[in-house]
Amino acid sequence: MARLPDGALMQRAAAGLAAACADLLGGVYGRRVVLLVGSGDNGGDALYAGARLARRGAGVSAVLLAGDRTHPGGLAALRRAGGMVVHPDAAADAAGAAIDRADLVVDGVVGIGGKGGLRPDAAPLAERAARSRAAVVAVDLPSGVEADSGEVRGAAVRADLTVTFGAHKPGLLIDPAREHAGTVRLIDIGLGPELPAAPELEALQHADVAALLPVPAAESDKYRRGVVGIAAGSARYPGAAVLAVSGALRGGAGAVRYVGPAGQAVLARFPETLVSDRGPHEAGRVQAWVVGPGAGDDAGAVAEVLATDVPVLLDADGLRLAARDAVRARTAPTLMTPHAGEAAALLGVAREEVEAARLTAVRELAARYRATVLLKGSTTLVADPDGGPVRVNATGTPWLATAGSGDVLSGLAGSLLAAGLAPRDAGSVAAYLHGLAGRLAAHGAPIAAHDVADSIPSAWRDVQE
């Protein structure tokens, strides 16, 4: 801002915001637009964008929530373009009535510095907008959500579209805030050279995942491609073993060794699996272990696997049975894959606390256990113990919330570990493929875990092509 002419960034943002609003409306002339305007630059962005829409024939009304602290240049521009002004403290009914008649409501109440939810004067207007027939567009991020963490600590706007500027904010990618953002559209306003080399958050795209996928060379054999060991399942939960193996077979390793009491069930479904019932220490050489899915109370197998010198993925019952000191003492990499309930138990807090502050929880778990942690959920997060950018994955679908889906993910990630990927890459690539496979399998309909496993090759090809 110091190097550019005064207001240049705001004009770029307003131009992008106005274009996005016009696209959403499908036509501007004769449409009714209400701006919810707070103090600061977000309010200025909304006012300048409103002025652009007014000049194209929209009927634009601005509800001023900041009084004398409203951006003066933006307010003057709106008035010159023929926009109207509504003061909610003087005419609350007029503000509500304008929202009820609107085709579009633009949320310019609070910017990235906002903390603690909407103030009492703004919350009722946000609620009214949510109940109205109008589409809601958030400026930069929905007002009331925490930009840096994705937390929502009070009332917040629920947007159909969020138009964000310069870079994605963590709150647009991490639930519960992501749920408030709707579709997110990024407007480039020229911040690229100013952005830090190490962001707070990374979200892989197809090209990133394709570059990480293991591809066999001409001289590869099944052992050179890596062998993954699966210590999972029990008499009560044999299906967990079958599903973990199903994910592992599709994850890039050359062979899968299974150890546990569900060998007959595994061989009946996957005869290519190398099966042993003599424990992990006698199973043969592997390049990585997956331990825990459906394991019941088999603490011995968990301890044996943790004592090995190869990468280990710890999931489900393995998370409950593993001693924290045993995990922390490992010199080989460890990847832990809890859901929110398991993460809460590991941290000694309520599940609601983890779900409300997922970014904080995954970082705390990684630091506490000295392990890479993949926190499963509507937005999957992967954090390394030494800090650095947290990976976020949003390829999934709510249809993945089905029994056994996590077992498939564990096998897939374990296979990628055995193929040579670092824990952070193995976890984030597995989450990406698993989520994409869920989408491909579902097509908007219910699916079972084996459907997800069956769709992993299609997801893999989609990424590569």
Image (tube, grey):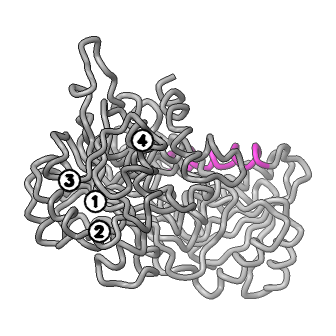
> Which residue is drawn at the image coordinates 38% and 37% (left, top)?
251
Range of the magenta residues?
A: 7-24
- What residue would you read off at disc 1? 314
Residue nearest the viewer, comparing 461 with 73: 461
User: Which tag is nearer the camera, tag 1 or tag 4?
Assistant: 1
**Mark 3 → mark 1, Cα distance in angstroms:** 20 Å
Q: In what element is the residue under mark 3?
A: loop
Question: Horizontal and vertical percent for residue 98?
Answer: 85, 72
Q: Amino acid at mark 3?
A: Arg
> Which residue is drawn at the image coordinates 44% and 69% (left, top)?
113
Q: In what element is the residue under mark 4?
A: loop
Q: Residues within 10 Å of mark 4 (few under 14, many from 20)?
A: some
Q: Amino acid at mark 2?
A: Leu
Question: Horizontal and vertical percent for residue 288?
Answer: 22, 45
Q: Is residue 79 left or right of residue 456?
A: right
- What residue would you read off at disc 3? 278
- Residue 319 appears in the figure: yes
User: Which tag is nearer the camera, tag 3 or tag 2?
Assistant: 3
